[in-house]
Structure formats: structure tokens, C-alpha cells
Image (cartoon, grey):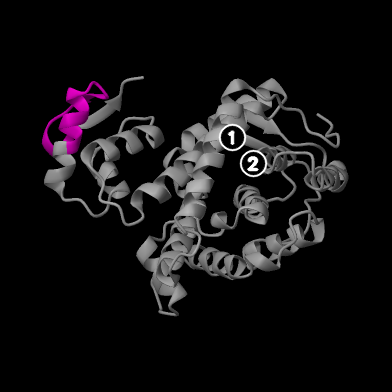
Amino acid sequence: MILSMKPPYQITPKILKLITSISEKIGEVNASFLIKQSPKLRKQNRIKTIHSSLKIEGNTLSEEQITAIIDNQHIIGPQKDIQEVQNAIQVYEKLNTFKVSYSKSFLKAHQLLMQGLIDDAGKYRKKGVGIVKGDEVEHIAPPFENVPYLMEDLFNYLKNKNEITLIKSCVFHYEMEFIHPFLDGNGRMGRLWQTLILMDEYPVFEFLPFETLIQQSQQAYYDALALSDKSGESTPFVEYMLEVILNALTSLLLFNGRIMKDIDRLHYFSQIQKQSFTRKDYMNTFKDISTATASRDLKKGVMLGLYTTSGEKNKTIYTPIH
């Protein structure tokens, strides 16, 4: 697959509907002055973003441990995981210094993100790579000789003012993952750069932790990448990512100082959780509710026909009815 100035994708009715809904939500966020968040809330969202992005890559540190590192406290944990967090903190502190349409900025971000983790941090790969899942090769990236040209094409695409930023951010994310320009760190760079592209037009994305929702729907994230690979265009991934962005904005509006009712929580949770889950998973999303409240919510969800159940008491597994 050779990238042109405009990578292949289709504008589907679903994409149009999602863009309309996202635009409305961004308007609500701006009208509510939510972009002027308190330093404490910004810090919490930054921690969530770092935690979720690195957890997708297998990092074992908790939000509490990441908070301690930000506060310059000593923690006990795998040195690699600590290094990853320290690097991510450094990158996110410098978000406003990166220029989204320039490869030099992109390589600098990768160098900061991966320093001390790989030998060639900040440099495009010099060998062929494939992504293996189980016993099967799921994706063979383009030859390493083509990477610099393909990435320059992609950055030229970002400079196209006629493209809708919301779509452009998703297309870049997918195409970068397809090219797989680095030996390691491609996933976190794709998510970071999408954030930067969105921030360029919508300041709210600086502290909107939509990576948390990617982490909560991790299998759907990989499925969307695989579907786009199979179809030869980024459309399935664009649809998936726009849904994630919409849910993240909805979450921001719901959680910001508003007392949520059980039906609000169930509606929101059904949007982000498509696989089977436990009461503990539900409470990880709504950290301020009690065990009894979570049980009542989920009982109501079953009565409303949102979920089927198996198992008993705190071992109950809830499965969404699609």
C-alpha cells in the first residue's frame, strides 16, 4: 500500500453522524468553560492518559504510583516501567512545543518517549518488521527503506487545510501504525500524535484522557486496526476512534460536577464496555460509588435488558446484549 497525499478512506453516514455529535459536544464543553479546568483536574487527567497509554503496552504501574513519580517520590516497581512513565511525563509536559506537521518534531517526541528503553530512540527503523499475534503474522510493515518517504507523505497530508481535523487525526493514527516507523513505541506515538493534531484545533484535547477509553476497549482498538488493514483503507479505524472521542467528551460533560443518576451511569458504561465485565470493572469507571450502589445499578441494567448474567454475588459476570 503506497500512501498518496490523501490516504484512502470513505466518509460513511456513521462518520458524518459522529462528527456532528462531536462538534456539538465540543460546543457544550466550550460553553461550560470546561476547557479552563483546575490544575488539580488537569493533573488527574494527565495521570489517566499516561496510565492508560502505557497499560496498553503492558506497563504494570498504577495511577497511584504514577502520581508518586510525578510528585518526585520514590516507588518500587520494574525499572523499565518506571522509565516509561518518567519519559511520558517529560513528553506530556512539552506537548505545546511539538509541531504536528513536521517529522523532526515527531522524531524528537519519540526520542523523549523511548530514551533509555531502545537504542534507536528518535530514529526510523532500519530493518523489516512484522506484527505477530499468537502463531500468525498479522501485519507486515512496508520495507524500512520506504519509511522516511511514507512518513513525509503523511506529514504533507496533515498540512492539507481542506481535510477535517477530526478525520485527519484518526487517519494519521491508523496510517502511522500501518507504516510502523519505529522498532518500538509505535502505539504510544500514534495515540500521542492524534492528541496533538486534535489539540491544534480544539484545546480541550490537551487534558481529555480519551486514551482511557481506548484502554477499556483495547480489543476493539486492535480489531479496528485489523479491519482497516484488511479493507486497505482507514475507514473502520476512523469510525472506531470517532466513537472513542465522542464518548470521552460525553464523559467530560457528565462527570464534571454533575450528580449522575443510575441511568446516566448505565448509559455511559454501555457505550464504552462492549465485552463481559464484573462489578469491579464497573466500579473502576465510577470510582465514587459504593459496592451497594454498583450492585443496584447493574441489577437495574439486567432488568432493562442491557445485560445477561452468569455466576453469583461478587463473582457475577455481566454480558452486554447487543
Mark positioned earlier in the residue sequence (2 or 1)? 1
Q: Position of residue 256 (x, y in %)?
A: 36, 55
Q: Which amino acid does label 2 sit on?
A: Leu
| Res 135 seen here | no
Q: Do the residues labelled 2 and 1 touch (CB within 8 Å)?
A: yes
Please identify the quadrant where the N terminus is shown: top right
Q: Mark 2 points at which residue?
A: 166
Question: Which residue is rendered at x = 63% and y = 63% of the image?
Answer: 113
Q: Where is residue 214 in the image (x, y as percent from the top left)?
A: 49, 43
Please identify the quadrant where the C terminus is shown: top left
* Mark 1 surroundings: few (<14), some (14-19) or many (≥20) residues within 10 A: many
Question: Which residue is rendered at x = 41% and y = 61% of the image?
Answer: 61
Magenta span includes 260:
no
Q: Where is residue 68 in the image (x, y as percent from the top left)?
A: 39, 73
Residue located farthest toward the front when viewing the structure as drawn: 31
Q: Mark 1 points at which residue?
A: 19
Q: Position of residue 95 (x, y in %)?
A: 63, 65
Q: Which amino acid does label 1 sit on?
A: Ile
Question: Which residue is rendered at x = 16% and y = 50% of the image?
Answer: 290
293 or 256: nearer the viewer = 256
What range of the chain is rendered magenta?
A: 297-315
289 or 52: nearer the viewer = 289
Question: Which residue is rendered at x = 36% and y = 47% of the image?
Answer: 254
